[in-house]
Image (cartoon, grey):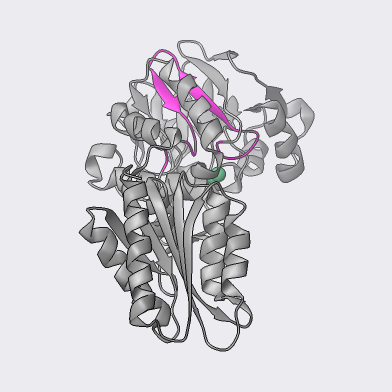
Amino acid sequence: MESFHVERLADGVHWVGVKDWNRRSFDALVPLPEGTSYNAYIVEGGKTALIDTTNPGFEEVLARNVNAVCGFDAIDYVVMNHAEPDHAGAIAYVLERCERAKLIATEKGAKMASVMYGVPEDRMVVVHTGDTLELGTKTLRFIEAPWVHWPETMLTYLEEDKILFPCDFFGCHTPRGMYDDEVEDIISLAKRYFGEIMMPFRKMTKKALESVMGLDVRMIAPSHGPIYRNPSRILDAYARWTEGYTKEKVIVVYVSMWGSTERMVDVMVDTLLSRGVQVCVYNLATADIGDVACELVDSRGIVLGTPTVLGGMHPVAFYGAHLTRVLRPPIEYGVMLSSYGWGRGAVRQASDVLSHTSIDVLGIIEVNGPPSDSDLTRVKELGELLADKVKGMA
Ligand code: FEO
């Protein structure tokens, strides 16, 4: 479904983005249960800037929205905060139709624009932190923010209206609502997005947040999801997430073929709950990986459960463990539960994956066939240790 609604944010400032209600996957990796938006903005101050563009396939929707504000050929500058195609995919289309428009990008961004979108050097202006672009009555200031989440990323700040355009930073995948207060679960959506996209770059996102905290921001207009007219909501959340603040919470990710691993998981979960630990449980055979990423953001412990199959971890559990490794959550403690029939391998492989994380593996319980009562007693004892660690009592 396409949208031709154009939203006025301030005098001379309009949202001209696209709401994509039908998209269900991003990067062939991240599930999008409800779609997303590709937000773009027009700033007019005498001269006109388009901030970010749109995903391939939505060029004409963008053009119609821009035309509703100022005429597509009135654009003098296209600000590319980020080179990924969901925001920069229409750059060639726009530059072709706006003959005098120049692309504004970081040094790395300009190189990417050349390689990915064929933008010639004489159509680009490279900017660095602190550089400004005078539009007449309005001023855009640029802040390099590398690795949120690509190396070329930057933030754009509209000084007169105190509006920050941070592209992916502070975003979330939903086409619902224009403003944060219209989307009840926006912080959950933003947390899921942080886990999926930003968490692997937590140190760099913390630096970028510090840059933002030095600005007087009245509104945050990201390039996915609603616009924050209450910026403190998302700034407070990002302060926690970028810091790596964790809760007395354990995420349990497991898969089970014939119920042996699951029986151990059940005892582990009951033990943790009985000790006052928050628990979230995901059977990886059916889980939404975005939900898992969301809970990884502030879990202090992890339980990984997998049987041995074909000489190693169940492939679905391997995928979950690998994602946990590459998303780099601030988890401190972990335990493994495993079962096998006639040959081992899962524990070795899982240990190898977790050895590349900073997770302190407190214990591993591996059983042959269904767990016996004494096996389940060991699971309970390991659960008690994990609970004590997570609660800071051991
Ligand atoms: Fe929304 Fe990194 O692109």
Tell me, yes or no, if residue 281 can be seen here. yes
Image coords of residue 115 (percent x, y): 76, 42
Which quadrant does ligand 1 occupy?
top right
- State whether residue 1 is above or below residue 15: below
Quarter of the rendering containing residue 110? top right
Does the magenta portion include 296?
Answer: no
Task: Choose between 169 and 328: the one closer to the eye.
Answer: 328
- State whether residue 151 is above or below residue 276: above
Tell me, yes or no, if residue 33 can be seen here. no
Quadrant placement of the C terminus: top left
Task: Choose between 31 and 320: the one closer to the eye.
Answer: 320
Image coords of residue 291 (percent x, y): 38, 58
| Number of numbered markers | 0
Task: Choose between 240 and 217: the one closer to the eye.
Answer: 240
Q: Residue at x 72, y 45 (%)?
A: 116
Q: Residue at x 41, y 19 (%)?
A: 213
- State whether residue 357 is above or below residue 321: above
Q: Residue at x 47, y 37 (%)?
A: 40
Q: Name the residue furthest front.
A: 374
Image coords of residue 124 (percent x, y): 71, 27
- The span shown in magenta is 148-171
Q: Is residue 163 left or right of residue 82?
A: left
